[in-house]
Structures are given as structure tokens and as C-alpha cells.
Amino acid sequence: MTQPSPEPDDVFAWIDGAERRREEAGLVRTLRPRPADSPLLDLASNDYLGLSRHPETVRGACEAAGRWGAGATGSRLVTGTTELHAELERELAAFAGFEAALVLSSGYAANLAAVTALSGRGTLVVSDSGNHASIVDGCRLSRAEVEVTPHGDAEQVRKTLAGHAGRALLVTDSVFSVDGDAAPLAAYAAACRETGAALVVDDAHGLGVLGEGGRGALYAAGLAGAPGVVATMTLSKSLGSQGGAVLGPAKVIRHLVNTARAFIFDTGLAPAAAGAALAGLRLLEREPRRAARVREVAAELYGRLTASGLTAARPDAAVVSVRAPSAAAALRWAADCREEGLSVGCFRPPSVPDGVSRLRLTARADLTGDEIARAVETVLRTAPAGAADMVQR
């Protein structure tokens, strides 16, 4: 009889080496719990319109939890769909200019659902190289043929689509989360029309910021509601809540309900999150000026930082990306800002595909002039040596 192999002392010993390599490369990530009353000036979150703590948004969450309970209690196809979910889907679709919408537990799940359910074996999926990780993962799970095209290269997208005879779709962010630049949606849509491909756009960073009254990048481009266009988005940024959604033709939404594993096998969005998102959406409809204000704040941050010698990508929405000399320098820079009372994002590989580390500042519609000045002064005062020598690529 074969004797069983002895148990190793530590089956996870290989993690020690991986940790050392991360430390040496300046790529260690840690959780940093924040208190409810954080004293830091927040330019790190995605709360673009300042709605996560708005009394109406909070009240929407509380009232929904009080009426429907703390959790959805099951998947959307079993017990997880409430009348509140349906109400949110109707109003979100109408606001953004689409025929129908489907709410999921996160924007990540929304991208997985849309990409996988609309592709599959024999389909070509063309993906912009700057796309969010959730799109990348959707492509990996799709079992489709995937071609990654250079960032923002509409002509290469057209050529790639034209070389495929079967079903195809192009998937892209509307606004890219690293540099804050916008995709060439008009050119991408033209390439799709020319080749008969579908267009799937993640409008996570466009909803609430771009378009008339914050209706999104697709609305601004005149593509909302087009028969070959599908939008995904998150409820966790401009709407101040949590969750995600897919918007498009009603038949596409029915198809996702029946085929999208990220929807079918996931617990429904908690009623509190649905209630908060609906309250945030209604508030934005009443106060459309918030969308323009966040763009103004982003432009002011960019103008002041670049005028002082730092290198930043011109923001097309709410994200202002400032380049750092190295991953370690970016990490130290963000830590120094935090010690000075300012919270900023720090993007390092693998979050940054081009290998250039950055600080990421997110504009908020509720920032005052004094807060903007304080943020800029803090970033400049803590800037590492060499930060002013970075060149925008």
C-alpha cells in the first residue's frame, strides 16, 4: 500500500517570497480603515457629487432598510427583486436615455454580466487596452476570441472588427479610471456601425459628470438608446451608493436576466443601497448643476497643479492623474499627503498598465475654493524630487 506523503510544514510558504518581491518593488497594498468622522480632506474617493453623506441619500437608505429589511434575502430571480429595484431600474433607464435597465450588486458584476452574456465562443471581443479590470475579467471569462487594441485607437479597432466575419462587440470605458481621459466614443461607434458590431461602454466615471445634467458620456455623444449600444455603470460613484447596472434595449436586458451568471447566481442588491441610489438619482435630476460643478473643480485642480510644474493628464471628467517618478515615490507621496491631512489615491502597477505610477485626485462637486487651494498646496509641498520632471505620454 502506498503511504501518504507527509504534510508539508507550511503549504503557503510560497507566499513569503511573493511578499518580499512586492515589498522590494514598492507594491505592497494594505487596508486602512477610516473612522466615520475622518479629519482628512477627501480627494481619493469616487464620491464625485458629494452624495454619499447627503441627508436625502442617507434617508433613502434608511427608509428602504426599514421597509424592505437589511438584505435582499436571495438572488434577483428568487426573492431578491423588490418593487424598489424595479423602480430604480425604470428611473435610471429613463434618466440615461435607454429603454431598460438591470440592477446588479456592483459595477464589477455589471461588466462581467454584460461582456459574458453578449459574447461567447465564436464571438470576437475587442477591448481597449486601458479598460478597467472588471472588463478585462469579463473578457477572460467570456470564452470568446479577445483582441486588445491600443488605447483610444479607433482605426485599429475598425480594422480588427473588419477582419472578423462572425458576431463581434467592442467594449470600452467611457472615461478611463487611471488618467481620467475619455474614449473616442463617436469614432468607436462609427467603427461598430460599419462592421455590424455591438458597442458596450462602461460609463462608471461618466454618469453624474458628463452629458446634460450628468446623464452620462453616451448621452453626451448622442449614443444613448441606440439599438446597438449597451451601457454599464456603477451606483457607487456619482450616486453615492453601491451597486451596478446594465442599460440597453429591452431584449438585451431580458437576455441578461436569462443568461448572465453574474446576475443569476448573485444575491440581489441590498434594499438600502437601492434606496440610496434612487434618492441620489432624484437629487441629481433636481440639481443638474452638480455635474457641471465637478467638471469645473477637476479643471481647476489640473490647471493649478500643472501651472506649478507637475505633470498631469488633462481631465475629461472628474479624475485628475498626477505622475510620480516611481512606485515607491508615489506611495511615499500619498502617505505624506495623508500626514498633511489630505487623502489622495495612489496608482501603481498592476493597476497602471504602462508602468507609470501616479497620484489620482478625484474632484467633488461639494469642494469649496479654500479646500481646492489647500489640496493643491499640500500636493505641491509634499511632491518628491523629480516629480516636476515627468513627461506626459
Image (tube, helix red, strand yellow):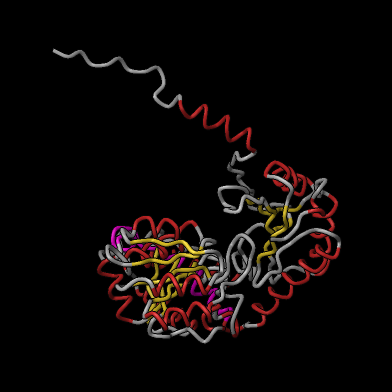
Q: Quadrant of residue 310?
A: bottom right
Secondary structure, magenta segment, majority class: helix
Q: Residue at x 70, y 77 (%)?
A: 293
Q: Quadrant of residue 153?
A: bottom right
- Horizontal arrangement in the rendering, residue 216 relative to residue 127 (left or right): right
Percent x, y for residue 195?
39, 79
**Closer to the camera, 372 or 248?**
248
Q: Residue at x 79, y 65 (%)?
A: 372
Percent x, y for residue 301?
77, 66
Say if 18 sits above or below 72 in the image: above
Say if 56 sits above or below 40 in the image: below
- Horizontal arrangement in the rendering, residue 69 relative to residue 55 (left or right): left
Percent x, y for residue 114?
37, 67
- Horizontal arrangement in the rendering, residue 60 relative to residue 392 (left or right): left
Report if residue 11 lies within the magenta region.
no
Q: Which residues are magenta?
A: 261-284
Residue 270 visible, this angle: no
Percent x, y for residue 16?
51, 27
Name of the residue lying farthest toward the left = 1
Quadrant where the C terminus sits is bottom right
Residue 381 visible, this angle: yes
Q: Residue at x 31, y 67 (%)?
A: 123
Quadrant where the N terminus sits is top left
**Closer to the camera, 131 or 297?**
131
Q: Quadrant of residue 320?
A: bottom right
**Closer to the camera, 296 or 157?**
157
Say if 256 sits above or below 134 in the image: below
Q: How many marks?
A: 0
Q: Residue at x 57, y 32 (%)?
A: 21
